[in-house]
Image (cartoon, helix red, strand yellow):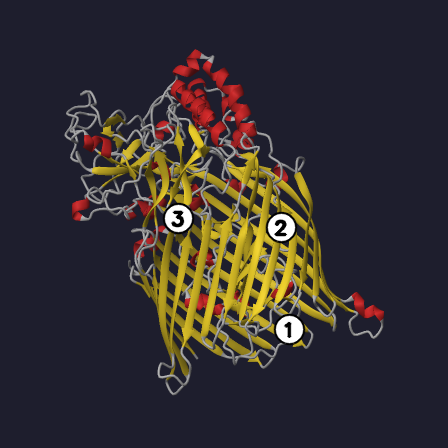
Amino acid sequence: MEIFNIQTMMIYPPLKEIPTWKLIYGALVLSAAYSPALMAQEEDVDVYELSPFTIDAGSEDGYRATQTLSGTRLKSDLKDVGASMTIFTEEIMNDLAANSIEDILNFAPNTDVFVNDLNDSQGFGNDFINNDVKYVTRGGSTTIVGQNFFQTGIPNDRFSTERLTFTRGPNAVLFGLGNPAGAFVSSTKQAHSKKKTSISTQIDDRGSFRINLDHNQPIVEDKLAVRYSGLYDASNHYLPDAEGLSKRHFFTVRYQPLKGTVLRANYERGTIDKPAVRPWPIFDAYSAWMQEGSPLRATPSTPRVEGMENDGARDLISTEFSPAGTQIPTMTLRNQARSAKPSFAAGFAPSGNKLSSIDESVFPIFHTTFAGLAARLHDYETNSFFLEQKITDKMYLELAYNTVENDYRSFNGMRGGDAMLHFDVNEQLPDGSPNPNVGLPYVQARPTLIDADSERINKRAMLSYDLDFTDRDDWVKHLGRHQMAVFLEDSRVESWASNNVHRNVTPLFTTSPQTRITHPWNQLSYRFYFDPENGKLSTAEGRRILEAPVIYSGDPIPEPGPNGITPAFVAQQGPNVRDVDVETEALAIQSFFFNRRLVVTNGFREDTQTSFAGLPADFRDFRDDDLNNVNPRTLSPRELFADSPESRGGSTKSQGVVFHATKFMSLSYNTSNNFSVNATTRDLYGNLLPNPQGDGEDISVKFDLMDRKMFLDFTYYTNSTVDKLDDIRRTPAGDFLQVRDIWNTIYNETGDPKFQSPPYATLGSIWKDRTTTTAKGWEFSMTAKPVKGWNIRLNGSKRGNSTTTERGVVTRQYMNEYLPIIKANETWMGYVSGDGEGRAVSEIVADLEETLRNFERIKDLPADVFAPNWTANLITSYRFAGDSSLKGFSIGGSMNMRGKTINGFGVDDSDTVLPDVPFYSPGYEIFGAWFGYDRKILNDKVNWKFQVNIRNVFDDYTVHPLRSVDTRDGNNTSSTALYMLREPRTIRITNTFTF
C-alpha cells in the first residue's frame, strides 16, 4: 500500500486545515487526565501535587496495577474494590505492541472481539459497519468505550491515551446509563514536569506504516507544561484491500498556578478511515453449477438448466470498477441466468442458503471482496477542560467540561448478503449481443452510505471529602474512615443520521412511479468480475463509489453522465434525529473499618434522560415529489418535537464489601445495576420498547502471595438483563425482516402511503423486540512477578448455565396477527417483490411462517449460546538483568485459548430446529511471541528500543468453523457452512527513540 496516495486523498476528506488560533489554543488548553504520562520512566517523578481524582505515578509495577479510579470515581487501592476489572498497564501494552483496544480485547477474562451472534446466522455482519468496536463478555455484548469517564464515539488509540481499564458487569458509579456487560475506560495523556520526546515507528509484513511523535515540554518549572502527540497510521488489514488511514493530533497542557489549584485540558483533531471488515470468506454461489458440469446458457430465451438460477433483480448494473473482464454498458440484467447457490447450505431452510467459499482452486479464501468496500470514516474534534481545586486537606473539587464534534460516514459498499460468488453463465447479454464476460466469476454490490453527525457536550462537578475518625483515641475511632464523592453531571448529545441507498438519479424511465429517483428500479449496483489465475481480484477501485454525492430533498440533481447514468446516494429511508439531555446526580462512599481490614463501598446514582427524537416515519411529509427525504442536519428535533419529549430515567446503585481476612487472603462481594434509556427503538407495531435494565453480582476470593509477588483472584458472577433490546430480525430460525419486503411491495403496487408507516412497514426497518437474559460463570486472574524482570498475566473463565426468557413476544404476536390478513388478500399474494430475488409475496409469507415455527424452537436459547464454554489467556515477558551478558534483551510470549463453541443445531424431517441437538466448533489456541532490545545511544542521550512481535506464531486456525448445518441425512450429521477468518502469522516491528 502506498503511504501517500493522491487518489485516496481525493476520495476521503483530508484533515481539515487547523487555523493558527486553534493550534495556539490547543497548546494552551489544559489536559484531562487521571494517570501518569504514557512514556514515563521509573525515574520520572512528577512534583505536581496529586488530588484524589488522579492515579499516583508509581501505581504500576510491570503487569500489576495497584490503583484505580473505576471503583468509586476516586483514587482507590485496587485490592479494596469489589467490582471486577482488568487493567492493562503500560508494560503490557508495550509488550503486545498494542495500539488500540482491539489489540488487547482478547486478553481480558471472559472477553472476545465480537464476530457473530445468534441474530446474524446469514453473515450480514452489520455490526462491523455500525460499530467501531464491539466485544462480548458475561453473556452479552457491548460497545461502550469511555475516555476520562465521558463517552466520545471516537475510536480509541494509544497515541493520545494510556492505561486502559475494562470493567465487567454493570457499574452504576461509572455509567448509570450503560450496558450490563461492561465498559472500557481510558485516560488521556497528560503533561508533566520532565522534558521528554518520543518518536515511535511501527511496520508490519503487510506493508503497514505507523509513526507517533510525542513531546512533553515544561514551560514554567513545576507550574506549566505542554505536550503534543501526533499520529500518522496507514494500516493494512490481514484481508486484502482493507486499508486504513488515520491522521490525528493531540495537544494537552497542565497549569498549576497555586499549590492547591490545577488546570488541565486537551484538544484533539483528526480524520480516521477505518476498514469495517467482516471476518469471513465470500459465499459460495457456484458449487451446484460446477457439479452439473458448468453449463452455459446460449441465449436469453434458452431455458435454464440444473445448477443455474434466475437473477430477478431489476437493478441497473455497472461494471465501471470491475478488476477483470470487459466493461459493458450500464444496463439491467434482470432474468439473466447465473450459477446457483447450494440448496442445503443454511441448515435451516429459511436462513439464506449461505455457504463459505473455501475452494482455493476457485477463489482465494482471504480475498473476501467486501473487505475493501466497507469503511467507517470520522472527521472529528474534541475539547476537554478540567479544574481541580484543593479546598482543605480533606476536600477537593473537580469541574470538567467536554465537547465532541464528529462528522461520521459509514460506507457499506457491499452488503454482507451480497458477497455471493456467482459465475456469469450467459453467452449473450439481454439485447442478444455477445457477452464478453461469460464464464467469469463475479460479485454484485448494492452500496449504501450512512451519513451521520453528532455533537456532545458534557459538564461535570465533583466534590470529594475524606472523613477520618481513626486518629481519635476514644471509641469514635471505630467509626472508621470514609472517602466520599458527590458529583453532578449534565450531558447533551445531538445526532443526525440518514441511511442512504445508491441510485441512478437521472432515471431512464418515462412513466411514474419509476421516474422517482428513489424507486427501486433505479437501484444502481456494481458487478465486479474476477480473473483469479491472473491475480485480478481487487475491489479497491470500488471505493470510488464514495465520490457520488448524497442527494437530499430539494438538492439539485447533477447533470447526467455520458451514458445517461448519474450515480448518487439518495435518502430513501428517511432521517433519524435526536437531541438528548441527561442529568445525573451521584454519591459514592468508600468506608474503611478495623484498620482497613473491612472496606465497604456504596454508590447511588439518579439519571434522567429527556429526548427529542424523530424516526423516518415522522418525516414523511418532508419528502419531495421523488419521495426523497430531507437532510437530517436541517432538522431541529428540540423544536419539532417540543410538545412531545420522551422523558425516562431511574435510580441505580453499587454496593461492595471487601474483607481482608489475612495478610494474604481477601473475600469480596459486589452487586450493582444500571439501565439504558430507550427513547427511539420500537417494536413491529411502532410502540416504544421499555428501558433495558441490568443487574450484576460478583463473589470473589483474592490472594496476595509470595511476599506480594503474586496476586490471584477467583470470581463467580451472575449477570442479568431485563427487557434487553433484542434484534431478532434475522436469526438461525429465519428472516423476520422479510415482512418489510411484503409491505414495501404492497406500497409500490398500490401507492397507499399507510403501508410505509407502523404497524406496517417501518421506514428504515428499525425495529426490535425485548427479552430477559441471565449469564453465570467463573473468572480467574493471576498477575505475578516471581523474580526481577519476569512478568506474568494469566486469566481465564468458565461459562456456566445461562438462560433466555420472554424472547420475541411482540414479534410472534405480530406475525400471528398479520400473516393471516396478508394471506386472505389474493391480490397481495400475487404481487412480485423488489427484494432482489423476484419472489412473489406468497413465497415470502410461506418463508415467514416457517421462520415463525423455527423461532418457537430456539426462542429460549441463551443469548451467549455461541460464546466459547471456557477461555484462557497468558501474557509473559522476561527482561535480562543489567549485569547479564544479555543486558538490554527481552523476550516474551502470549496465548489465547478457547473451548468449544456451539455453532449450529440439527433439524428434524420437516427442517424444524432441534435445540437439544447442538453442533460445535472446536476449541483453539493461538500463540504470540516477541523479542526486544534497548540501549542508550548517541552518548547516552537517546534511549533506543527495538522490538519484533510475531502474532499467531504457528499460523494456526486462520480458517475456523463459524456455523454448522444439518446435512439432512437422517442422523443429524453436521457440516460446516460458514467459516471465520483469523489473522495469519504477522510480524510487527517497533522502533522507539526517547530523549
Identify the residue position indicated by label 3 in the image. Answer: 276
Q: Secondary structure at mark 2?
A: strand
Q: Amino acid at mark 3?
A: Ala
Q: Report if the CB atoms under discs 1 and 3 are less than 8 Å apart.
A: no
Residue 114 image position (x, y, % from top left): 44, 48
Q: Quadrant of residue 283?
A: top left
Which residue is at a point 46% across and 58% down the rendered structure image?
A: 107
Given the current orientation, which residue lies at the most extreme bottom position?
939
Badge nearest the viewer, 1 or 2: 2
Q: CA distance from mark 1 to mark 3?
A: 41 Å
The one nearer the camera, 86 or 911, is: 911
Q: Which mark is residue 37?
A: none
Q: Earlier in the sequence, mark 3 or mark 2?
A: 3
Q: Quadrant of residue 354?
A: top left
- Could you tell which of marks 1 and 3 lies nearer the N-terminus? 1
Q: Which amino acid is tagged 1?
A: Leu
- Residue 405 is situated, as x and y percent measured from the top left of the image, at 53, 53
Residue holding disc 2 = 697
Residue nearest the observer in this picture, 420 or 138: 138
Q: How far from the left and from the top, in percent, is residue 189?
A: 53, 67
- Badge 3 marks a residue whose secondary structure is loop
